[in-house]
Amino acid sequence: MKIYFHGNCQAAALARMVKEVIPDGEITAREIHIEAQFEDRSAYLHDLKTADAIVAQPIRADYQGGFERSLDFVRREARGGIPIVTFPSIYFDGQLPEWSYLRRGGETLPPYEMDYHNLFAFQAALVREDVDAFIARILSPVLYSRKLIESSLERGLASLASRERDLKTDITVSDLLRERCRTQQVMSTFNHPRRMLLAACANRILRHLGREEEVAGEGEEYLAFPQIPVLPAMALFLQGGKQADALPEFRLSYRMKTGQLQETFFRGAYAHYRNLPDGLLASVYRKNRDARIFLSTVALQSAPWLWQKWGHLQAYL
């Protein structure tokens, strides 16, 4: 059987999982953001026209790569009558609300060590918080209230469920997240699902294709880097109030497989943002409404001293 996977890095990871249980099948994948994978247009069209089944994310024609990488193009070029199974882009920041992409117009603020920005490190640098006070705050087990955590989880779940409904995907993932997100970390980053979640998604895809194979929930992590651990406050919630003996480590890249302690990483991130121009930080802050709302909410609920010392960050700017 020839199955072609089409989408972002999640599609490629799912393809590798399906290959585990259908080793004799021809399982191929393309990641729409990797230009080199589309340089040979004839090979791309061949995969679409000869596949027995296609698994794809609902990529829009105005997204990266244009119409020829969209779901509409995939449907047009595929052989008639074959199953085309759609699944959502799995974006869930409910357990990692302190991470984001920070942009100013079309320009991305230079990140530290990875593509993502830590909002607390950014905030601490912006208001020139003492670095030791910042470290104590971000690693505090009471940084987040239970109310804030529940709100963050529900907001993330509702957002994904809404996209699944709007896009009418054949496969849903929001319910799988809901089953797991209060007891275990389900995402390595807000757009890199961990294996246990991808395996459950892969098995739904296989059932949709009438296959009986079962992908194991344990095994190689195909989206393992970077791996961002939840903060101690979130970990305390996930562990039912039981505090961990040791803080988990960041796993940053394929080239650097040794871990980095949370404190070490956050000190480096703080120094990185402090070295950026103050005007740039202020401009990025003003243009990222969701970041402002999140930081304000945390300050009000969990760090009133921060609120009192600097006032609302909007007023500070």
Image (tube, rainbow, N blue to C red):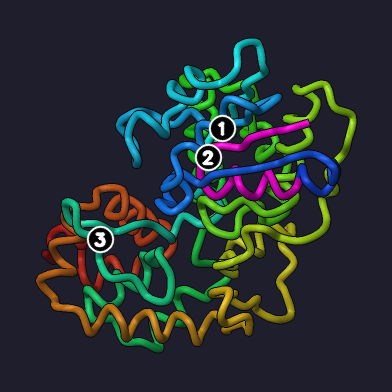
Question: What residue sits 32% from the left and 86% below the top?
Answer: 271
- How would you rate the neighbour count of disc 3 (Cα within 10 Å): few for under 14, some for 14-19, many for 20 or more? few
Residue at image x 46%, y 19%? 166
What's the residue at 66%, 28% (across, down)? 51
Q: Label 3, label 2: how many angstroms apart (C-alpha)?
A: 33 Å
- For label 2, the residue is 43
The x, y position of residue 153, in whole percent, is 55, 44
Dot 1 corresponds to which residue? 46
Helix, strand or loop at label 3? It is: strand
Q: Amino acid at mark 3?
A: Thr
Residue type at tag 1: His
- Pinpoint residue 105: horizontal percent, then vertical percent: 16, 51
Q: Which mark is in front, 3 or 2?
A: 2
Extent of the magenta region: 1-17
Q: Is residue 308 highlighted in magenta?
A: no
Outermost residue, top side: 81
Q: Nearer the viewer, mark 3 or mark 1?
A: 1
Seen in the picture, residue 280 relative to 89 is either above or below; the reply is below
Q: Which residue is mark 3?
A: 108
